[in-house]
Image (cartoon, rainbow, N blue to C red):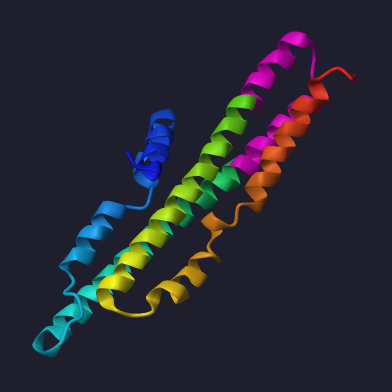
Amino acid sequence: MKHGKRHRAEVARSLPEWQFKFLSYKALKKKLKLMNPNPNGRHRARAGAQDMGFKQSLNRELDKVNTFYLDKEEDYIIMFRELESRAENLNGNEEMLELQREILDFHSEMVMLLHYSVINFAGLMKIVKKHNKRAGGAVYSSYMRRVLQQPFFSTELLYNLIRGCEAILDGFSPPE
């Protein structure tokens, strides 16, 4: 099993509701196969339409990934603030243990979102590279520059939330 499939399977197993939120690599690959390599003559118009259809599908998939990622990020900001507030107002060890468990679960889900980002980025790179080979154009570099600016690729906020959870958990530890 390829590396990306393993990660995707891991995320889908851990969070099955995310299964259909990934880039539909297989569907894009099928669209790509419909395109004629290096079209010439009478096939050029048909190939151009197929190429346009592929690019539209690719943009829809990119929008799907971004929408899911941004929705999760917004949820995580709210959840983090709630957990942070609860950590500041703890009443006893039992409540602290419950909060630690919740923070660890939350931390784990955010790490899974990082995996989600990496898997989708790798899929985009591969499919755009395949398109470039088939269509013979220089789409790869221009499209990948665009991908690097997408929300799902900008993981700084997510890393900050993860570090914030770690800081809360560190605060529960007795000083050395």
Residue 12 placement (x, y as % from top left): 39, 35
Q: Is residue 9 above or below residue 60?
A: above
Q: In this view, does 92 lie above or below 137?
A: above
**Dominant secondary structure of the residues highlighted in magenta in the image:** helix
* Residue 88 in view in this figure: yes
Whether residue 79 appears in magenta in the rendering, the answer is: yes
**Residue drawn where x is 20% and y is 74% of the image:** 50
Q: Is residue 42 above or below residue 100?
A: below
Bounds of the magenta segment: 76-103
The answer to which image quadrant residue 79 occupies is top right
The answer to which image quadrant residue 82 occupies is top right
* Residue 89 in view in this figure: no
Closer-to-camera residue (77/168): 168
Q: Is residue 30 above or below residue 74?
A: below
Would you say 128 lies left or right of 164 here? left
- The N terminus sits in image quarter: top left
Residue 70 placement (x, y as % from top left): 53, 52
Whether residue 51 appears in magenta in the rendering, the answer is: no
Would you say 33 lies left or right of 20 here? left
- The C terminus sits in image quarter: top right
**Residue drawn where x is 54% and y is 65% of the image:** 148
